[in-house]
Each structure stands twice: as C-alpha cells, then as structure tokens.
Image (cartoon, grey):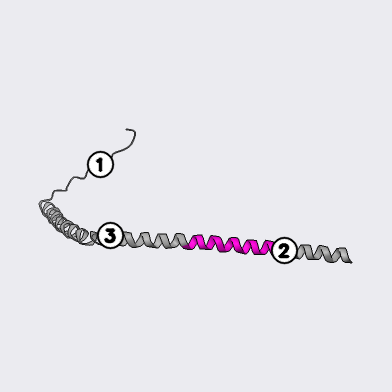
Amino acid sequence: MTALLVLTLIYVAILVISLASGLIAIFYFLNQARANLKAIAAGLKEVDKNVVPLSEALTAANNGLSLVQADLEKTAENLAIEGAEPTRPQPATLGT
C-alpha cells in the first residue's frame, strides 16, 4: 500500500509540474504576441500619418482624370456622329 501511495504522489507531482510548465509557456508566448501586436499597431499608425498627404494629391489626380474622361467621351461621341469607329489596338499574343 505504501508503494502505491508513493507512486501516486510522484504521478501527481509530475502532473502538476507539467501543467504548470505548459501554462507558463502559454503565458510567455502570449506576452510575446502582445508585444508584436503593439509593434504592428505602432507601425500602422506611422503608415496612417504618412498616407494623409496623399489624399489631396490623389483627389487632384482624380479630378484631372475626370476631365480627360469627359474629353474622351466627347471625342467618341463626335466620331460616332461622323460614323467612324475608333480603332482599338489588338492585344499582343505571346509566342507569335
């Protein structure tokens, strides 16, 4: 009976140690993940700061392209009135 009690206590000690070490490892890796997520968040804030000036430039470019689109549509309408079809370039084929 004494041998069984000793073996049971050894088994319980090993079980407690293995569970504790597993939980400590989980805690350690979760802390590392938290630190990495903080670094990512800081980097994304920097990206956000750097992208803010692009808004004005992209708005200006978009407005300019809208004018070009309007001119091209007017040209297409004029060509349609004259009965001419604009020629479209043929896509290049590979290997020929």
Q: Which of disc 2 and disc 3 is earlier in sequence?
A: 2
Residue range corresponding to the magenta coloring: 15-34
Category of crowding for the residue at label 1, using alpha-carbon neighbours closer than 10 angstroms: few (below 14), some (14–19), many (at least 20)? few
Indicate the position of residue 48 as horizontal and vertical percent values: 31, 62
The image quadrant where one finds the C terminus is: top left
Category of crowding for the residue at label 3, using alpha-carbon neighbours closer than 10 angstroms: few (below 14), some (14–19), many (at least 20)? few
Amino acid on which the number 1 mark rests in the picture: Gln
Amino acid on which the number 2 mark rests in the picture: Leu
Name which residue lies at 80% across and 65% down: 8
Name the side, left or right, on which 78 lies relative to 35.
left
Q: CA distance from mark 3 to mark 2?
A: 53 Å
Residue 7 belongs to the span the image colors magenta = no
Residue wearing tag 3: 51
Name the side, left or right, on which 35 lies relative to 26.
left
Among the 4 quarters of the image, the one containing residue 77: bottom left
Among the 4 quarters of the image, the one containing residue 94: top left
Residue wearing tag 1: 90
Name the side, left or right, on which 92 lies relative to 86.
right
Q: Main secondary structure of the magenta part?
A: helix
Amino acid on which the number 3 mark rests in the picture: Val
Residue wearing tag 2: 15
Indicate the position of residue 25 as horizontal and vertical percent values: 59, 60
Name which residue lies at 36% across and 59% down: 43
Name which residue lies at 49% across and 61% down: 33
